[in-house]
Image: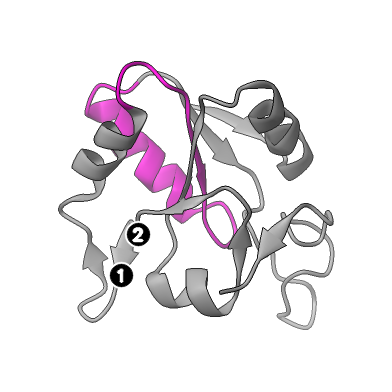
């Protein structure tokens, strides 16, 4: 798995339109916190039981079809690493993780979006 900063990811997605951009956060995070434009939701872990989604690998493999790069993002870049490792174990080879995720790391006051992440970098996102 390769790791890219949010800005590197945005540039990669612009130059590789065939790439599949997967937001692995929960449905509630995707809908209420916002999500990167162009991303598709395939939760790695979701409610109500907060267990690993047994359909995750199948959904991503279907979206990636034949050898399309898969770019994963979560809140801070941790869940997406776990999801990426599972995809690689399942045979996908062109997997990328977005460092710092959508909201970034916690600051000294336990807030996100203050010093890194997709939103902090001012990259395109939507809230639906």
Residue corresponding to mark 2: 43
Left or right? Give the position of 61 relative to 27: left
Q: Residue at x 62, y 72 (%)?
A: 127
Q: In the picture, residue 16 is in which quadrant?
A: top right
* Residue at the image point whose x is 56% and y is 62% from the top: 75
- Within 10 Å of disc 1 (Cα), the crowding (few <14, some 14-19, many 20+) is some
Question: Can you tell which mark lies on residue 46?
Answer: 1
**Residue at position x 20%, y 78% in the image:** 49
Name the side, left or right, on which 109 lies relative to 39: right
- In this rendering, the answer to whether 37 lies above or below 4 is below
Residues at badges 2 and 1 in contact (C-beta under 8 Å)?
Answer: yes
Q: Is residue 77 magenta?
A: yes
Is residue 100 placed above or below 91 in the rendered structure?
Answer: below
**Residue at point 84% right, 57% down?**
122
Does the stretch in magenta take in 66?
Answer: yes
* Label 2, label 1: how far apart the Cα atoms are: 6 Å
Q: Which residues are magenta?
A: 65-92
Is 121 situated left or right of 31 in this image?
right
Residue 109 numbered tag: none
């Amino acid at each position: 798995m390769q790791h890219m900063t949010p800005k590197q990811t945005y540039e990669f997605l612009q130059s590789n339109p065939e790439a599949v951009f997967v937001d692995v956060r929960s449905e509630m995070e995707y809908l209420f916190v916002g999500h990167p434009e162009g991303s598709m939701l395939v939760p790695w872990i979701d409610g109500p039981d907060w267990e690993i989604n047994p359909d995750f690998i199948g959904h991503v493999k279907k979206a990636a079809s034949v050898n399309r790069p898969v770019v994963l993002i979560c809140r801070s870049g941790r869940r997406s690493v776990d999801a990426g490792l599972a995809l690689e174990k399942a045979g996908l080879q062109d997997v990328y993780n977005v460092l710092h995720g959508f909201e970034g790391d916690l600051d000294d006051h336990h807030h996100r979006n203050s010093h890194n992440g997709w939103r902090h970098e001012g990259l395109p996102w939507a809230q639906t």
